Image (cartoon, grey):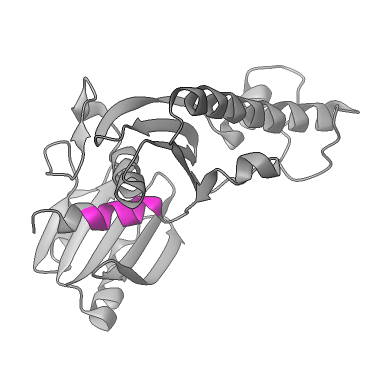
Amino acid sequence: MTSLAIDIGNTSMKYAVFDNQSMIHHQRVMGHDVDMLANEVKEYHPTHTIVCTTASLSEQQKTVLSQLTKHTVFLSHTTPIPIHNRYKTPETLGMDRLAAAVGAYMQAKGNVLIIDMGTAITYDFVDSEGNYLGGNIAPGLQMRLQALHDYTSRLPYITAEGAHPELGEDTETAIRCGVIDGIKYEIEGYLRQFFLKYHNLSVFFTGGDELYFEDEIKKRIFADKFLVLKGLNYILRYKS
């Protein structure tokens, strides 16, 4: 079975074509031009499509997506999935978080912690029995940099790229180091907590922002920028 998995975020759209479990093509584009997906269908001839979106789509966009292939699934909290969703309000859970949880668990088949570095940083956990137990949401890298500028009268907006000493030597490096190192220490704190509680834990790191970690920590993390798309493919094939 050849399938098309589509992940539509707030500012960009990622999609991949799978031949069974093998990804044979992937692409990321800015915006939500769903019409362009027709070209992928013509080239790869997928028979099934699954769509995950955190953006508000127009009825016309939904119609285009639903007609790409013969079978189309719009992921929701009622869609059958290969793990158990124990979130107290499943209808409010971001479907990209759920898809990433599926992608991680189906690869590791054990306790998994998923860290997604997107607009927000999300921490999600699935236990060894396949129960999605929930997760936490924190501001992402760009959000933190922007907030320091927006919510103060004198702090400038600073980009993440640039000098990064151990301690800030001026306002620019003080902001950059404070934000980047703050995220790093936050993530390391989560890792310490979960590794103490779950000795057979696998950690999956996904999303667009990359940070430097010590080698000992990096050895325990699986970096997978296609985790959501892989999860969508697993969901599409579940009970199909």
Percent across and percent down for residue 151 are: 63, 18
- 103 sits left or right of 148 in the view: left
Residue at 39 percent across and 58 percent down: it is 14
Q: Is residue 82 above or below residue 46?
A: above
Percent across and percent down for residue 74 are: 17, 50
> Where is residue 101, by image quadrant?
top left
Residue at 82 percent across and 38 percent down: it is 164
Front residue (pair 149, 136): 136
Residue stretch rendered in magenta on the structure:
227-234
- 93 sits left or right of 198 in the view: left
Q: State which quarter of the image contains the C terminus.
A: bottom left
Residue at 18 percent across and 45 percent down: it is 82
Evaluate whether residue 60 shows in this view.
no
- 200 sits left or right of 93 in the view: right
Front residue (pair 205, 192): 192
Q: State which quarter of the image contains the N terminus.
A: bottom left
Residue 44 falls inside the magenta stretch: no
The prevailing secondary structure element of the residues shown in magenta is helix
Percent across and percent down for residue 186 are: 60, 25
Residue at 54 percent across and 48 percent down: it is 208
Evaluate whether residue 1 shows in this view.
yes
Percent across and percent down for residue 228 are: 36, 50
Residue 232 falls inside the magenta stretch: yes
